[in-house]
Image (tube, rainbow, N blue to C red):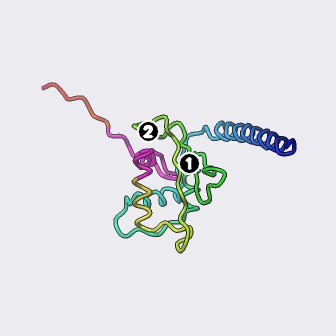
């Protein structure tokens, strides 16, 4: 009996230590990434395909490219539990999710597996885009991020009406 309780205590202590170290890493990464967010051209092309903002048929997307693009948007990404399998938990940065989901900044997704291992086909993209928009309003968020190497679109300025 004593051996089992000792192992349980050791495991709990190890888990506490891991949580503390993960929190410290997250705090360091957030402070290191406080610079303004700029979207890479690859990520812009990825999200254009995912949200189908361009005309024509959709290309297949890779799951690992999706995870990378979300990380580039400063989402925290980790396993969705001890036995999560292909489950991944995405936690949004503070700037995302200002709507009906405010305060619930996490979403769990399962990566594609079986015969289409790692591929997001058109139907998968449609469902994924709908969930991301419902949960994080991500399409609007991404649309407002400047793309590296491109000039920001000029803001329309209304001139006051002249009195005649």
According to the image, label 1 marks what residue?
90
Residue 144 appears in the picture as rendered: no
Q: How far apart in space, not on screen, are marks 1 and 2 (Cα)?
A: 14 Å
146 inside magenta stretch: yes
Left-right relation of 151 to 18: left
Residue range (magenta): 131-156
107 inside magenta stretch: no
Q: Is residue 47 above or below residue 151?
A: below
Residue 78 % position (x, y): 63, 50
Left-right relation of 14 to 74: right
Question: From the image, which quarter does the N terminus lie in?
Answer: top right
Residue sticking out furthest to the left = 164
Residue 74 % position (x, y): 58, 45
Q: Is residue 38 above or below residue 123?
A: above
Residue sticking out furthest to the top = 163
Tag on residue 101?
2
Left-right relation of 149 to 85: left
**Residue at position x 16%, y 25% from top?**
163
Q: Residues within 10 Å of mark 2 (few under 14, many from 20)?
A: some
Whichever of callouts 1 and 2 sits on the residue coming sooner in the sequence is 1
Residue 148 % position (x, y): 53, 51
Left-right relation of 79 to 25: left
**Residue at position x 79%, y 38% from top?**
13
Residue 91 % position (x, y): 56, 44
**Residue at position x 83%, y 45% from top?**
4
Question: From the image, which quarter does the C terminus lie in?
Answer: top left
Q: Residues within 10 Å of mark 1 (few under 14, many from 20)?
A: many
> Dot 1: what SS?
strand
Residue sticking out furthest to the right = 3
Residue 163 appears in the picture as rendered: yes
> Dot 2: what SS?
loop
Q: Is the C-beta separation of discs 1 and 2 under 8 Å?
A: no
């Amino acid at each position: 009996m004593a051996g089992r309780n000792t192992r349980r205590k050791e495991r709990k202590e190890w888990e506490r230590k891991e949580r503390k170290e993960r929190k410290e890493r997250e705090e360091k990464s957030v402070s290191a990434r406080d610079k303004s967010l700029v979207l890479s051209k690859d990520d812009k092309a990825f999200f254009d395909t995912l949200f189908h903002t361009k005309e024509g048929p959709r290309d297949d997307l890779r799951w690992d490219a999706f995870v990378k693009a979300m990380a580039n948007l400063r989402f925290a990404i980790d396993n969705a539990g001890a036995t999560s399998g292909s489950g991944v938990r995405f936690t949004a940065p503070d700037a995302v999710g200002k709507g009906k989901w405010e305060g619930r900044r996490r979403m769990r997704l399962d990566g594609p597996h079986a015969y289409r291992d790692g591929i997001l086909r058109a139907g998968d993209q449609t469902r994924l885009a709908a969930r991301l928009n419902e949960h994080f309003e991500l399409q609007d968020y991404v649309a407002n991020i400047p793309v590296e190497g491109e000039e920001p679109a000029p803001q329309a300025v209304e001139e006051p009406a002249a009195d005649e």
